[in-house]
């Protein structure tokens, strides 16, 4: 009888451990996170490494922030009129992806934030819309059950007009 109780106790413990979610069974955490850019297209690449996941575990990672893009009309000679048409577009931006850990229980990858698109500026003949500058603020990367890492503010000016 005592032997049966011991076996039942061990089986109950094994079953309880087997049904824990991966975030409960492991010590998942961000090892590093950072951003590079904005690049020549105005995109901000957010890279991250998460460890402590366990083997072959799929997680969702999101990067987000607020962005402002300034667009202006540039002539075909590469110059700007003395009083160029321009517009600023602002709003929240985000990118999300699902990633699967390898045998070592880590995920190393990146997501890309893109500037808000030009939705209103049209240029007269002989001119075209160009991205003049872009800035990202309150940039962060997060994953449910793992946490959030704040990365800061990033900006780039392509043309001084």
Image: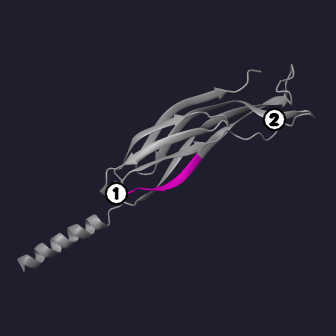
Q: Which quadrant does the N terminus fall into?
A: bottom left
Q: Is residue 74 above or below residue 148?
A: above
Estimate the x, y position of residue 37 in percent, counting from the top left: 58, 33
Q: Closer to the camera, 87 or 160?
A: 160
Q: CA distance from mark 2 to mark 1?
A: 48 Å
Give the residue displayed 51% in from the left and 39% down from the top.
Answer: 140
Name the quadrant containing residue 42: top right
- Main secondary structure type of the part rendered in magenta: strand
Among the two numbered marks 2 and 1 on one chain, the one whose residue lies closer to the N terminus: 1
The residue where tag 2 is placed is 129
| Outermost left residue | 2
Instruction: Name the image quarter holding the C terminus.
Output: top right
Q: Residue 113 at x, y = what percent? A: 60, 42
- Checking the image for residue 54, the label placed there is 1
| Residue in the foreground of this view, choosing between 121 and 16 | 121
Question: Hey, which residue is sitting farthest top in the picture?
Answer: 82
Residue depicted at x 7% and y 77%:
3
> What is the crowding at mark 2: few (fewer than 14 residues within 10 Å), some, or many (at least 20)?
some
Q: Secondary structure at mark 2?
A: strand
SS type, badge 1: loop
Quadrant of the rendered structure where residue 64 is?
A: top right
At which x and y percent is residue 45? 56, 40
Which residues are the magenta region? 95-102
Residue extending furthest toward the right: 125
């Amino acid at each position: 009888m005592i032997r049966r109780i011991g076996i039942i106790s061990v089986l109950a413990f094994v079953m309880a451990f087997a049904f824990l979610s991966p975030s409960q069974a492991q010590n998942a955490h961000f090892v590093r996170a950072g951003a590079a850019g904005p690049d020549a297209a105005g995109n901000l690449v957010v890279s991250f490494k998460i460890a402590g996941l366990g083997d072959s575990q799929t997680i969702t990672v999101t990067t987000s922030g607020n962005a402002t893009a300034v667009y202006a009309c540039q002539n075909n000679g590469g110059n700007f009129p003395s009083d160029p048409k321009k517009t600023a577009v602002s709003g929240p931006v985000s990118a999300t992806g699902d990633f699967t850990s390898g045998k070592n229980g880590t995920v190393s990858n990146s997501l890309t934030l893109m500037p808000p698109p030009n939705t209103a500026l049209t240029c007269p003949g002989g001119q075209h819309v160009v991205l003049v500058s872009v800035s990202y603020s309150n940039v962060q990367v997060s994953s449910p059950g793992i946490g959030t890492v704040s990365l800061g503010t990033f900006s780039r000016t392509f043309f001084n007009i």
